[in-house]
Amino acid sequence: MNDAKTNRKSVRRARRLPGFAGWVLFALLLVLPGNAPAQSSSADEVKINALLAKYRQSVDSLDPALISEVWSSDLPVSFVHPLGTDEGLSQIKSDIFGNIMGMFSKRDLIFDTTAIHVNGDSAWVELTWTFHAIWKDTGEPVTTQGRETQVLVREQGNWRLVHVHYSGPPTTIARKGV
């Protein structure tokens, strides 16, 4: 009789263990990255790369429709650059794409490196770039280099910029850039 009692307890424990192990496995699947998020992230990276191509094209062409397509129209947007900070899409269009990019008769923005980070409906991109241009007033060529952090959000299934912060490349000169 004692053996029967022990057997029943073992059977009950054995039945509980798969239930407990199942819950632990389920919890781990929720927490640990799996194939589905990687596929989604990969699809998001493709869409973000397409947005980056449009961003480059908007800088090169100064096309107002393309600029509006790249930037969010639903959320506040901002652009931090060495000459100041622009708040709102109309100010970005006027200052960055009108005044600053308007100083050049030709523009060619090239992304040297990009790193895309997706977190749900938000993402950020770290990139370095080289910018080749021709000064409108003198016709002389100019080349600059820099780096940017771009913050994006997903709006109605599409990625849009909400913030850009750009600066020059890191300096190796002592006591500069501190």
Image (spheres, helix red, strand yellow):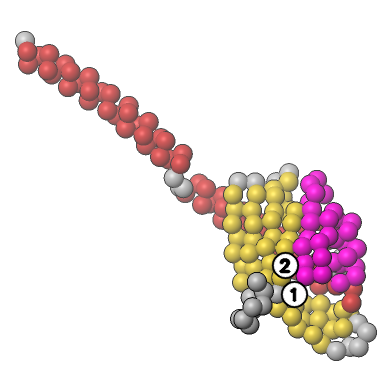
| Quarter occupied by the N terminus | top left
Give, as a three-letter code, the residue at label 1: Leu
Q: Is residue 147 above or below residue 70?
A: below
* Residue 92, picture quadrant: bottom right
Residue 151 visible in the displayed image: yes
Tell me the SS state at disc 1: strand
Q: Which residue is mark 2?
A: 166
- Circle 1: is it few (<14), some (14-19), or many (20+) Cα within 10 Å? some
Q: Residue at x 41, y 35 (%)?
A: 26
- Asked where in the image residue 161 lies, by quadrant, the reply is bottom right
Across and down, in percent, residue 21 comes to: 32, 32
Q: Position of residue 152 (x, y in %)?
A: 69, 54
- Residue furthest to the front in view is 175
Could you tell whether 178 is left or right of 19 in the image? right
Q: Pick whichever, 125 or 16, lies toward us.
A: 125
Residue type at mark 2 is Tyr
- The residue sitting at 79% across, 47% down in the picture is 75
Q: Quadrant of the C terminus?
A: bottom right
Magenta stretch holds residue 112: no
Question: Dot 2: few (<14), some (14–19), or many (≥20) neighbours within 10 Å?
Answer: some
Disc on the earlier residue, 2 or 1: 1
Residue segment shown in magenta = 71-100
What's the CA distance linking mark 2 and mark 1? Answer: 13 Å
Can you see residue 46? no
Q: Position of residue 168 (x, y in %)?
A: 70, 74
For residue 88, the mark is: none
Q: Residue at x 66, y 77 (%)?
A: 176
Q: Which residue is denoted by mark 1 in the rendering? A: 109
Depth check, mark 2 against mark 1: the one in front is 2
The verdict on residue 88 being magenta is yes
Residue ranking furthest to the right: 137
